[in-house]
Image (spheres, helix red, strand yellow):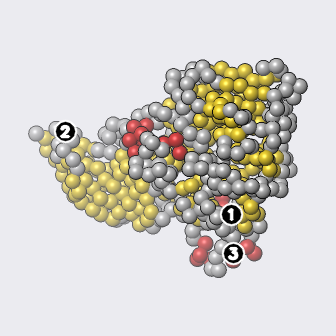
Amino acid sequence: MIPLTGFAPDADVTTPGLLTDCVNLIPYLNGMEGAPEPVTPASTPALAAACIGAAVVSKLDDTRRIIAGTATKLYELSAGAWADVSRAAVYNGGVDTRWSITQFGDATLCANRADVIQRSTGAAFADISTAPKAEVLFTVGAFVMALNTNDGSEKPDGWHCCAAFDDTSWTPSLATQATSGRLVATSGRLTAGMRLGEYAIAYKQRSIYLGQYVGAPTVWNWIQVPGGDAGCIGKEAICDIGGAHFFVGDDNIWIFDGTRPIPVADGYVRQFFFDHSNPSYRYRTICVFDRQKNLVWVFYPSLGSITPDAALVYHVVAKKWGVANRSIEAALNYVSGGITIDGLSAISSTIDGLFSYSFDSQFWLAGGKSMSIFSTSHQLQSMTGVSTSSSMTTGDVGDDDAVSALNKIRLRYALAPTSANVQTFIQQNSGVGFIAAATGSVLDGKFDMRQSARWHKATFSFTGAVKVTHMDAEITPAGMR
């Protein structure tokens, strides 16, 4: 049997095992599986307004805070409610404002570039009086790094770092090592940034800079990374996949491990992504890494949309792609409190009502991390539900010079769906277009077909959770020209 190689619409359609189309189907190590449905954690209300940034942060004692921001407020999820932890004055978020959230020791810091950096150690946030406004915040070593700043004057290519081990001090000083600078070797503003080991990585749309701590007086030494025009299109179009960054660029999708950026979409989904995403709002792409499943979710605005409503999903080990479109406001790795027997009634009054959660879901584990989203209804939802429906379409099988008979198709499952159906298509001459042919359902583990043509392909539709690993078709010669 032929192993499934994932969604690859850019590849040669006659490549064995590829999928030319799929719906709600994502890769796992040994094949493809139905994408999980979003479910709302127990006793978690919706935010008062659209979420424009959220994160789960951990303090030094391992206690966690779940912070979410709107255009005018910052909230913390506490005791089943969103508590307003904003400063006294409302924030000045605009149409394109997004919160950047990081943790430094016991302090949570937030930046939106419309207001000075905010700080909280558990109570309400407050301005850091000496800090700049910043687009991007992240922690690296003994410092908090701020990119794309305004310290009284606009510095879209500027960076600042706080004093060593002191996130409350941002006034430049040789004694404290608080300092700032600008990255001007390439054009454009700083669009994203993230720690990579002991290095600070700053991204522009078409370039990358690596910052290394060198001590006073320079503090940080920056070099441009070789890699052509590789860069990041937006502050959330990047995620840490453990020892490397995964990010969406202006002309490709990349992984960067500190040496050179490597493209990962060529020959698979690169052209598909740029053909189907809105070029005017592509910078609003959101990437999030599901560590438990080794999956990167790339949420992006499709053509005609201004907010993320479509998603490509990449398995970093299997190097396969899938599709699971969702409309979202923000994404994060939510950490659940776990579920006890006594607490089951808060989720469902009956055992049958628990079917939405798969038994291997992180939802059931105390401290279990699950990839989560904020829906367009401002509701936090974890991607831990059981898949309800999915589909996949094969590549083209046949020969330009020979007519063949398709007799049956068999799929190999690691987890069989509740039901499965097939719609086949035929084409007599390449390029003229496929037309619908036979349909069928499972009989004795296979789909029986009776059709003849030069070219064949099939779309399989699944109901319920499914894991499919291989496929095979019985095709026999039926004549030659």
Tell which residue pokes out farthest to the right in this image: 175
Where disc 1 sits, the SS reads helix
- Check if mark 2's residue and mark 3's residue have beta carbons within 8 Å: no
The residue mark sitting in front, 1 or 3, is 3
- Give the Cα separation between the discs numbered 2 and 3: 60 Å
Could you tell me which residue is drawn at 56 percent across and 50 percent down?
95
Is residue 2 left or right of 27 when viewed as pictured?
A: left
Direction from residue 260 to residue 6 in the image, left or right: left
Residue 151: x %, y % from top left: 72, 34
Please tell me whether residue 397 is drawn above or below residue 156 in the rendered image.
Answer: below
Mark 1 → mark 2, Cα distance in angstroms: 53 Å
Q: Which comes before the other along the chain, label 2 or label 3?
A: 3
Q: Name the residue under label 3.
A: 346
Disc 3 residue type? Ala
Q: Position of residue 227 (x, y in %)?
A: 54, 23
290 to 381, vertically: above or below: above
Q: Can residue 365 be seen in this view?
A: no
Rendered location of residue 251, percent (x, y): 46, 32
Which quadrant of the structure image shows residue 71? bottom right
The residue pinned by badge 1 equals: 364
Q: Which residue is drawn at 51% across and 22% down?
A: 228
Quadrant for residue 188, please give it: top right
Judging from the image, what secondary structure is the residue with disc 3 in? Answer: helix
Give the number of the disc on residue 400.
2
Mark 1, Cα crowd under 10 Å, few <14 / some 14-19 / many 20+, is some
Pick the residue in front: 11 or 46. Answer: 46
**Which numbered disc flags the more N-terminal residue, 1 or 2?**
1
Which mark's residue is nearer the viewer, 2 or 3? 3
- Residue drawn at 24 percent across, 60 percent down: 438
Amino acid type for the residue under numbered disc 1: Trp
